Image: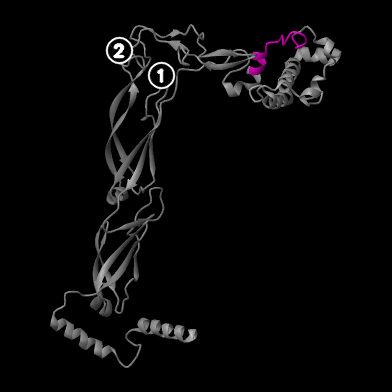
Amino acid sequence: MSKQDYYELLGVSRDASDRDIKKAYRRLAMKYHPDRNPDDKEAEDKFKEISEAYEVLSDAQKKAAYDQFGHAGVDGQGGGFGGGGFEGNFSDIFGDVFGDIFGGGGGGGRRRSGVQRGADLRYNLDLSLEEAVRGCEKTLEIPTLVSCEPCDGSGAKPGTSAKTCSTCGGMGQVRMQQGFFSVQQTCPTCRGEGKVISDPCDACHGQGRVEKTKTLQVKIPAGVDTGDRIRLSGEGEAGTHGGPAGDLYVQVHVREHPIFQRDGKHLYCEVPISFVDAALGGELDVPTLDGRVKLKIPAETQTGKLFRLRGKGIAPVRGGSTGDLIVKVMVETPVNLNSRQKELLREFAETTEDGGNSKHSPKKHGFFDSVKKFFEDMT
């Protein structure tokens, strides 16, 4: 039976680039691979055909011969399954096309380096509002992995060194043949390191790192807020086999304050005032982070009124103008009144109830007028 044209098998033109040929083969190989089509003889045959086509068209010499003489130009050169199965090195093809999936390259695989960067660490730091606003210095106790001093992080006993792994030849990976294709796996002897420590260090037992609690002095800049993160370069876990250390990230959380609430660079607080001060006006001592300030309350102030004290907020950590302190006054109803105080209030009420006049309580009368109109509209 005559063989189908290799270009037609892969669905590419004769002037297709090497990249297009590989891309076409990869797509078809995924579709017809025996693992995806178990017990499907037709798919298996198709997979062999496209693999044979790719084995020829991916080789510049064989491709030139095929372009000039057709199948006759590549017969006997490892380009046919013919009567006795595939004679070419299929594992090389598979490794070349699927190397990025299995971690290897055509025929050899990539060596894993034992030198690796240490892991980053995170430390959650609670601060008071005052510490966050003004800045401070904190002492942190960080449990981490540091480089072993006796072996200088090599893992081998001082005076000795690691040897190249005899199983993988220092590559860190080995090929496992599965049927007519191979899969690259981590070397079971050296666990991917490429080297074997025959005489490990007594201090770290061959790990190159030991557990230790580090003490660090950290300067917290003024103006930080919950969610801000401070990066300390090289203060994370030590790397392996001389690799660089990771970083330490200090995650800031600002605790709730009994007086102030924070919103970015602004501060908010509620201040209670008597109904006498609200009606007649007066002066209040208002707390700020820098001490007390006098706030003048105008006469006839209603509960919930906001007063802005400019520049009494927070200077942002990333620069910019200082925020404000927003004071919300809350009129407090007097409690625990004696009989004389109650009598005086009743007399006061009589003087303000002037036949429905809204002069003294405009909001009250405005509200009940709206309620009355609402019910009238319903009827």
Q: Main secondary structure of the magenta part?
A: loop
**Disc sitting over residue 242 in the figure:** 1
Disc 2 element: loop
Q: How is the image coloured?
A: one colour
Category of crowding for the residue at label 1, using alpha-carbon neighbours closer than 10 angstroms: few (below 14), some (14–19), many (at least 20): some
Mark 1 or 2, closer to the camera:
2
Q: Looking at this rendering, what residue extends furthest in the bottom direction?
A: 355
Q: What residue is at 84 percent from the left and 10 percent from the top?
A: 72
Label 1 secondary element: loop
Instruction: Point out which mark residue 174 bears.
Output: none
Amino acid tagged 2: Asp
Marks 1 and 2, how far apart at CA = 18 Å
Decide: is 249 above or below 31: below
Image location (x, y in percent) of residue 59: 74, 14
Displayed quadrant of residue 69: top right
167 horizontally vs 363: left or right? right
Question: Which residue does the numbered mark 2 point to in the structure image?
Answer: 202
Of callouts 1 and 2, the N-terminal one = 2
Residue 57 location in percent, x, y? 76, 18
Residue 335, x across and y down, in percent:
19, 74
- Bounds of the magenta span? 78-94
Nearest to the observer: residue 116 or residue 319: 116
Question: What's under tag 1, amino acid-wise?
Answer: Gly
User: Which residue is rendered at x = 34% and y = 88% of the image?
Assistant: 359
Quadrant in which the N terminus is drawn: top right
Asked if the stretch drawn in magenta spans residue 86, the answer is yes
